[in-house]
Image: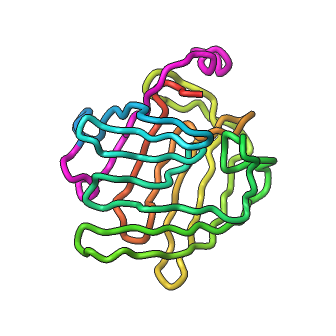
């Protein structure tokens, strides 16, 4: 098994889209019939833009899903309030994670079934496990910290996400989320780190 430090020293740039339900893609990405390999198209401080061969784009802010483009259902914008990461932080979840963390998520999206843009806010709680677990990633097995995010959307129900974080930096290595109420699920994992 590779050590976490030796794996992180490499400079490669790819993200594996583990799953993106068919309802979310204009044309399904194919990778083991479930997802696809996205390549780093652009990087700015704290933000990465990932593209498929068909120009479908996924944007991650500090590893957290923030927007998509070129899909049937698109997440236009995500804003996190109450977490206060430093500008140079590599994670949206700075500081100790030994107690549940509360914050607010604001998202804007467009569903394929409607041309209208919707925006909604959710009260969020992130709860992390006390111990790491070894997690299978596309090119490695790493000890990561499982964190469960519960989003309570005002008047629209609850969605849940799971993130796997590096125990020391809290970088997101893997995620599975339902970005908004009733949205298709979205899952990804780091194939090769870009940091």
Question: Considering depth in this image, is 149 or 28 the residue closer to the camera?
Answer: 28
Residue 31 located left or right of residue 98: left
**Quadrant including the C terminus:** top right
Location of residue 63 in the rendering, given as x and y in whole percent from the top left corner:
56, 43
**Quadrant including the N terminus:** top right
Residue 174 located left or right of residue 39: right
Magenta stretch bounds: 1-28
Location of residue 42 in the rendering, given as x and y in whole percent from the top left corner:
46, 35
**Number of dots carrying numbers:** 0
> Does the magenta segment cover residue 23?
yes
Q: Residue at position x 43%, y 32% from top? A: 40
Residue 20 located left or right of residue 154: left
- Tell me: residue 9, above or below residue 188: above
Location of residue 8 in the rendering, given as x and y in whole percent from the top left corner:
62, 21
Question: Considering depth in this image, is 163 or 134 the residue closer to the camera?
Answer: 163
Location of residue 46 in the rendering, given as x and y in whole percent from the top left corner:
61, 42
| Furthest residue in direction left, as rendered | 27
Question: Considering depth in this image, is 84 or 171 the residue closer to the camera?
Answer: 84
Colour style of the rendered protein structure: rainbow
- Tell me: residue 102, above or below residue 57: below
Q: Residue at position x 28%, y 54% from top? A: 71
- Tell me: residue 164, above or below residue 40: below
Q: Residue at position x 40%, y 46% from top? A: 58
| Furthest residue in direction bottom, as rendered | 155
> Does the magenta segment cover residue 138?
no
Q: Residue at position x 34%, y 68% from top? A: 110
Residue 68 located left or right of residue 165: left
């Amino acid at each position: 098994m590779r050590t976490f430090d030796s794996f992180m020293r490499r400079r490669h740039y790819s993200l594996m889209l583990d799953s993106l339900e068919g309802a979310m893609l204009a044309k399904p990405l194919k990778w083991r019939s479930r997802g696809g390999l996205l390549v780093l198209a652009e990087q700015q401080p704290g933000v990465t833009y990932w593209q498929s061969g068909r120009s479908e784009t996924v944007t991650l802010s500090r590893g957290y899903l923030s927007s998509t483009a070129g899909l049937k259902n698109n997440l236009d914008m995500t804003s996190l309030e109450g977490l206060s990461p430093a500008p140079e932080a590599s994670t949206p979840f700075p500081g100790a994670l030994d107690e549940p963390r509360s914050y607010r998520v604001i998202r804007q999206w467009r569903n394929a079934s409607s041309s209208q843009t919707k925006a909604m806010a959710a009260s969020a709680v992130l709860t992390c496990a006390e111990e790491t677990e070894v997690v299978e990633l596309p090119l490695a097995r790493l000890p990561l910290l499982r964190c469960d995010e519960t989003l309570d959307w005002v008047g629209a129900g609850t969605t849940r996400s799971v993130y796997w974080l590096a125990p020391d930096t809290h970088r997101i290595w893997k995620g599975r989320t339902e970005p908004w109420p009733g949205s298709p699920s979205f899952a990804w994992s780091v194939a090769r780190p870009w940091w």
